[in-house]
Image: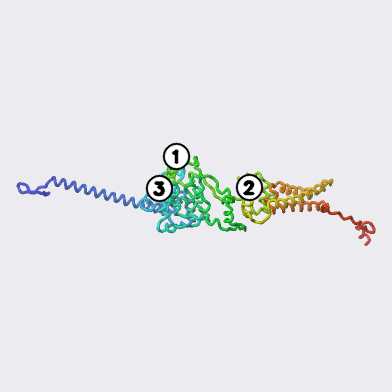
């Protein structure tokens, strides 16, 4: 069938059905071509727009200028080892999807929040994919294999990327999430404690001291004192016998924190479903541990942070070696060098009474003075100091107008003596300071006597020598010699 065909008279005429079909086909083709061209134009234009948007928003200057809430983050980045790495290289996942989410969707979302004045009402969880960290040019997984050391704590990345928490893998930013000056993505040590010290995770997470503190059985020297942990271990002592009160807090979920994102909070039954809560909040919404949990602290406390001294003031002052003005004079070796708190000797299972068994924890089999030896020596020194002060007071009482200076010195000696007598340990808390205070009392008594020109009493049981007859000058008074001579 042709477009032109002859008639009966031999003339060529158009075949209109075919012409109509041809026109329709051409029109459809033109429409399709136009549509495809339009799509390609839109795609190309959109791609170009995405590219331009990506190039603009990946610059740190854009983040700092356009979003004032990011100024602190940008400043932290400028001072860190990541300086020179563009924001988008970490914050956008690798690949086209990451580019679309980071360069188009995220800016639109942020802009809408700012326009509607809803920006910052809820915490913003910025997720950085492990794929971004583990790029070929960045942190290769093979370089993270094996054990490493972080703040003297042994750490293995592979063990933490093996689904140890409720069967879920931790992310890089689960631990590397703290911004500190000079380090944009520092390890937040407190994240370790929320897992390793929380009661509910002890069945899944190792919590023994030796897991992190390898070499804990080595001989160590601390502030000039040598200590052999193996000898202590051989006696059956646990770490917490000496290193007490090392963790603070329970890492519980604070229901009030739920209200930051959820009006009215979470139903109790949902909170109890730990696996579901972690899946929804951590995996899906990139929540950090402390967005929900309270912190758990892990430190070796200062020996003086224990609150015993609030009631046992004299014992606290003697142990710390403080004078009445709060100045450190002679701290106990246990306090000043070993930083031992009260509970090392005054243990809970003994009703906080210090016994010989407490001493044997560290000193078993070692030669040295016993508690009784120290207390007998203390008692002898205390009696001498007290007798000297009593004699001074009696001497001052006999005078009609005692010296004000002598009275002040006497009061100072009384205060030191009172501190000695009030310490229930009878010298054991701080033998060196006890000796010093007893000698100090006697020195004050001597000074007071000199200020009133009162002769020191002779030692007890020492017969007094008879006074020699005083020699007189020829004319009576030695002061008159110069009148003539």
| Numbered disc in front, either 1 or 2 | 2
* Residue 405 seen anywhere in this rendered image of the structure: no
Which residue is nearer to you in this view: 472 or 97? 472
Instruction: Name the quarter where the C terminus is drawn.
Output: bottom right
Lower position in the chain sequence, tag 3 or tag 1? 3
The answer to whether residue 40 shows anywhere in this view is: yes
**Which circle's residue, 1 or 2, is located before the other in the chain?**
1
Q: Which of the labelled discs sits on residue 379, or is there none?
A: none
- Quick one: 4 or 270, which is closer to the camera? 270
Judge by depth and name the residue closer to the eye, 260 or 468: 468
Q: Position of residue 247 (x, y in %)?
A: 55, 48
Residue 119 located left or right of residue 312 = left
Secondary structure state at the residue bearing disc 2: loop
Residue that numbered label 3 is attached to: 106
Q: Which residue is mark 2?
A: 346
Q: Which mark is residue 270?
A: 1
Q: Is residue 214 left or right of residue 326?
A: left
Alpha-carbon neighbours of circle 1 within 10 Å: few (<14), some, or many (≥20)? Answer: few
Q: Residue furthest left?
A: 9
Q: Position of residue 163 (x, y in %)?
A: 43, 50
Mark 3 or 1: in front is: 1
Q: CA distance from mark 3 to mark 2?
A: 59 Å
Q: Give the class, few, some or many, for how many residues have Cα within 10 Å of label 2's Cα (few <14, many ≥20).
A: some
Q: Position of residue 151 (x, y in %)?
A: 52, 55
**Rendering coords of residue 235 (x, y %):** 59, 53
CA distance for labels 1 and 2: 44 Å
């Amino acid at each position: 069938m042709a477009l032109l065909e002859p008639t009966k008279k031999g003339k060529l005429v158009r075949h209109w059905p075919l012409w109509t079909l041809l026109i329709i086909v051409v029109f459809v083709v033109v429409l399709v071509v136009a549509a495809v061209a339009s799509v390609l134009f839109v795609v190309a234009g959109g791609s170009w727009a995405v590219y331009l948007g990506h190039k603009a928003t990946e610059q740190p200057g854009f983040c700092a200028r356009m979003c004032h809430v990011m100024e602190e983050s940008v400043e932290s980045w400028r001072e860190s080892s990541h300086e020179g790495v563009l924001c988008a290289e970490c914050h956008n996942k690798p690949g086209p999807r990451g580019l679309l989410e980071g360069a188009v969707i995220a800016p639109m979302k942020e802009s809408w929040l700012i326009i509607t004045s809803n920006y910052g009402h809820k915490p913003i969880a910025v997720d950085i994919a492990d794929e971004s960290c583990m790029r070929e040019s960045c942190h290769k997984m093979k370089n993270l294999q094996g054990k490493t050391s972080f703040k003297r704590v042994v750490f293995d990345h592979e063990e933490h990327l093996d689904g140890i928490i409720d069967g879920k893998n931790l992310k890089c930013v689960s631990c590397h999430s703290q911004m500190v000056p000079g380090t944009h993505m520092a390890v937040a040590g407190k994240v370790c404690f929320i897992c390793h010290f929380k009661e509910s995770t002890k069945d899944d997470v190792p919590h023994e001291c030796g897991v992190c503190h390898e070499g804990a059985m080595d001989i160590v020297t601390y502030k000039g004192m040598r200590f052999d942990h193996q000898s202590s271990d051989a006696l059956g002592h646990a770490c917490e016998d000496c290193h007490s009160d090392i963790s603070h807090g329970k890492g519980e979920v604070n229901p009030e924190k739920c209200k930051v994102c959820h009006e009215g909070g979470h139903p109790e039954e949902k909170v109890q479903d730990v696996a579901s809560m972690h899946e929804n909040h951590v995996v899906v919404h990139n929540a950090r541990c402390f967005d929900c949990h309270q912190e758990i602290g892990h430190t070796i406390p200062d020996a003086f942070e224990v609150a015993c001294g609030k009631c046992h003031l004299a014992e606290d002052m003697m142990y710390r070696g403080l004078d009445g003005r709060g100045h450190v004079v002679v701290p106990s070796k246990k306090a000043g060098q070993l930083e031992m708190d009260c509970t090392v000797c005054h243990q809970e299972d003994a009703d906080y009474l210090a016994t010989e068994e407490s001493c044997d924890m560290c000193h078993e089999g070692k030669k040295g003075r016993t508690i009784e030896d120290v207390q007998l020596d203390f008692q002898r020194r205390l009696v001498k100091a007290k007798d000297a002060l009593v004699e001074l007071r009696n001497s001052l009482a006999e005078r009609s107008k005692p010296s004000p200076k002598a009275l002040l010195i006497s009061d100072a000696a009384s205060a030191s003596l009172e501190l000695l007598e009030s310490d229930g340990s009878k010298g054991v808390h701080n033998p060196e300071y006890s000796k010093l205070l007893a000698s100090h009392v006697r020195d004050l008594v001597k000074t007071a006597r000199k200020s009133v020109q009162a002769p020191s009493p002779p030692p007890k049981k020492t017969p007094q020598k008879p006074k020699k007859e005083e020699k007189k000058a020829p004319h009576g008074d030695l002061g008159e010699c110069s009148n003539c001579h």
